[in-house]
Amino acid sequence: MTRILFFLIGFVFMVLGLSFIILYLNLLSLGYNLSVYVNFIIRRIECYLEPIGLIIMLLALTIKGDKKNELHLWYCIKLSRLLL
């Protein structure tokens, strides 16, 4: 359950960070070049949410959880195979 919660928190952070990055793309239409845009994005705190969210999501996917739920799932799968 905690892995799902961390995955959702990471997803929200990533969406917020990417939305700010996309919103700041309007600077390119005002006449700024790409290097000034990237420099601006690097200095904004709210744009750091995107890599933080990505790291949280990857950690939630790769770190193994407790064995209690895996054992329960294993018995459910074995029971369903016996019934079929």
Image: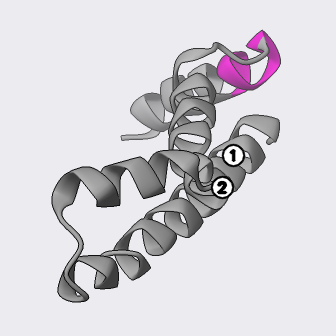
| Res. 8 mark | 2
Q: Amino acid at mark 1?
A: Ile
Q: Is residue 78 above or below residue 30?
A: above
> Residue 82 colored magenta?
no
Which color scheme did the rendering employ for the protein? one colour
Residue 67 lies left or right of residue 45; in this view the side is: right
**Main secondary structure along the magenta-highlighted residues:** helix
Residue that mark 1 sits on: 4
Q: Nearer the viewer, residue 9 or 41?
A: 41
Residue 40 lies left or right of residue 44; in this view the side is: left
| Magenta residues (range) | 67-72
- Element type where label 1 sits in the image: helix
Residue 7 lies left or right of residue 15; in this view the side is: right
Judged by depth in the image, the label closer to the viewer, 1 or 2, is 2
Q: Amino acid at mark 2?
A: Leu
Residue 13: give x, y in percent of width and height.
Answer: 63, 57
Residue 7: give x, y in percent of width and height.
Answer: 63, 45
Q: Is residue 51 above or below residue 71?
A: below
Binning the other alpha carbons within 10 Å of mark 2 as few (below 14), some (14 to 19) or many (20 upward) gives some
Residue 48: give x, y in percent of width and height.
Answer: 59, 46
Binning the other alpha carbons within 10 Å of mark 1 as few (below 14), some (14 to 19) or many (20 upward) gives few
- Element type where label 2 sits in the image: helix
